[in-house]
Amino acid sequence: MFGQIAHFLDFFRGDSLNLRNRISRVLPHWSPEAPMYSFVLGMHAFGLEECNQYPAAEAAGRRALELAPEDAWGRARHDPCLRDAGPRR
């Protein structure tokens, strides 16, 4: 819950670097078997997207959806990445 609150504060402050970096720092300490891991991946995807790292954001969002197709964070990040990245070459 702390991570989510901090994530929301970063968002409302417009702090895209911390949207990405805060989750990047804690993600290595999470196991894919841990409850809510897909949620953390979705938050990570959001931070990556806000820093214009669309391929990495799409990959994180896709992985979150593979783990939990109902995960709103993963879905909300994966679809905009496809749109915002522009046409693939």
Image: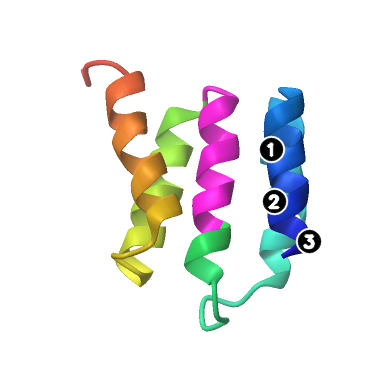
Magenta span of residues: 41-52
Q: Which residue type carries mark 1? A: Leu
Number of on-image labels:
3
Asked if the stretch drawn in magenta spans residue 24, the answer is no
Name the element at disc 1: helix
The CA distance from mark 3 to mark 2 is 11 Å
Residue 2 is labelled as 3
| Label 3, residues with CA under 10 Å away: few <14, some 14-19, many ≥20 | few
Residue type pointed to by label 3: Phe
Image coords of residue 32 (percent x, y): 52, 76
Residue 60, x across and y down, in percent = 45, 50
Disc on res. 23: 2
Q: Is residue 12 above or below residue 59?
A: above
The percent coordinates of residue 73 (x first, y second) are: 45, 52
| Side of 68 where 42 appears, left or right | right
Mark 2 element type: helix
Residue at the (51%, 44%) spot, across then down = 45
Residue pictured at 28% horizontal, 24% vertical: 83
Identify residue type, mark 2.
Ile
**Quadrant assignment, res 26:** bottom right
**Dot 1: few (<14), some (14–19), or many (≥20) neighbours within 10 Å?**
many
Q: Earlier in the sequence, mark 3 or mark 2?
A: 3
Query: What number is the disc on residue 30?
Result: none
Which quadrant is the C terminus positioned in? Answer: top left
From the image, give the main secondary structure of the stretch colored magenta: helix
Horizontal relation, residue 29 to residue 45: left or right: right
Lower position in the chain sequence, tag 1 or tag 3: 3
Q: Are marks 1 and 2 in contact (CB under 8 Å)?
A: yes
Q: Which residue is mark 1?
A: 19
Residue drawn 52% across and 83% down? 33
